[in-house]
C-alpha cells in the first residue's frame, strides 16, 4: 500500500497537519510482519534539530523506518541510529547558519544603500532621506 501526503508548510511551523496525518497513519498500520517506511524527499523537509529529533522519537515508538531520496542522509534509516541523530542535530545548526548569513547579507546591503532584493538607490537625495529616516527608528 502506498499513500502520498504533500505539505507545503515551512518546517518551522508548529502545526503541520499533513505530517501529523502521515505519522499517525504509519503508526496505525504498523503491525507484526508489516514493514512501514516513511519516505521523504530530503530530511530537511521533515524538520531540523529538535523538531526532527522529536519526530524520530515518535517514529521509533511506532517502529516506523525512514527513507530519504536526496540530500546528505540519502538512504534508509532506523530513526534510532546514532548517525541519523548526529545529522539531525547538524541540520538544526545549518538552519541557524543560513539565517545568520542571510541577516548579515541584508545588513551589508543596507549599509551600501541597497535594498534587500539587490536594487540600488540611484538618487542621492532619496538615499540621504532614507538613511535619515532609518536612524530615527
Image: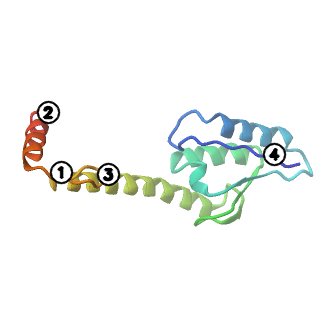
The residue singled out by tag 4 in the image is 3
Determine the image quadrant of residue 67. Answer: bottom right
Q: Secondary structure at mark 2?
A: loop
Q: In this orientation, which residue lies closer to the viewer: 131 or 75?
A: 131
The residue singled out by tag 2 in the image is 137
The residue singled out by tag 1 in the image is 121
Q: Secondary structure at mark 3?
A: loop
Q: Residue at x 39, y 56 (%)?
A: 98
Q: Position of residue 113 (x, y in %)?
A: 16, 52
Estimate the spatial distance between the alpha carbons at disc 2 and disc 1, rounded to whole Å: 20 Å
Estimate the spatial distance between the alpha carbons at disc 1 and disc 4, rounded to whole Å: 51 Å
Which of the marked residues, 1 or 4, is nearer the chain's N terminus?
4
Residue 36 drawn above or below residue 77: above
Q: Position of residue 30 (x, y in %)?
A: 85, 44
Which of the marked residues, 2 or 1, is nearer the chain's N terminus?
1
Which of the marked residues, 2 or 4, is nearer the chain's N terminus?
4
Q: Position of residue 120 (x, y in %)?
A: 21, 54
In the picture, measured across the screen, residue 25 lies left or right of residue 47, that is right
Q: Residues within 10 Å of mark 2 (few under 14, many from 20)?
A: few
Q: Residue at x 90, y 50 (%)?
A: 34
Q: Residue at x 59, y 65 (%)?
A: 71
Label 1 near label 2: C-beta < 8 Å? no
Estimate the spatial distance between the alpha carbons at disc 1 and disc 3, rounded to whole Å: 11 Å
Image quadrant where one finds the C terminus: top left
Label 3 near label 1: C-beta < 8 Å? no
Q: Secondary structure at mark 1?
A: loop
Q: In this orientation, which residue lies closer to the viewer: 10 or 22?
A: 10
Which of the marked residues, 3 or 2, is nearer the chain's N terminus?
3
Give the foreground label among 1 and 4: 1
Q: Secondary structure at mark 4?
A: loop
The residue singled out by tag 3 in the image is 117
Give the foreground label among 1 and 3: 1
Amino acid at each position: 500500500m502506498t499513500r502520498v501526503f504533500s505539505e507545503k508548510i515551512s518546517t518551522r511551523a508548529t502545526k503541520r497537519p499533513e505530517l501529523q496525518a502521515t505519522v499517525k497513519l504509519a503508526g496505525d498500520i504498523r503491525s507484526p510482519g508489516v514493514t512501514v517506511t516513511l519516505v521523504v524527499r530530503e530530511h530537511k523537509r521533515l524538520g531540523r534539530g529538535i523538531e526532527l529529533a522529536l519526530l524520530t522519537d515518535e517514529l521509533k515508538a511506532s517502529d516506523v523506518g525512514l527513507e530519504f531520496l536526496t540530500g546528505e542522509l540519502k538512504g534508509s534509516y532506523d530513526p534510532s541510529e546514532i548517525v541519523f541523530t548526529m545529522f539531525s542535530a547538524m541540520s538544526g545548526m545549518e538552519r541557524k547558519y543560513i539565517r545568520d548569513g542571510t541577516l548579515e547579507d541584508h545588513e551589508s546591503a543596507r549599509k551600501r544603500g541597497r535594498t534587500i532584493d539587490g536594487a540600488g538607490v540611484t538618487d542621492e537625495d532619496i538615499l540621504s532621506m532614507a538613511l535619515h529616516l532609518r536612524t530615527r527608528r
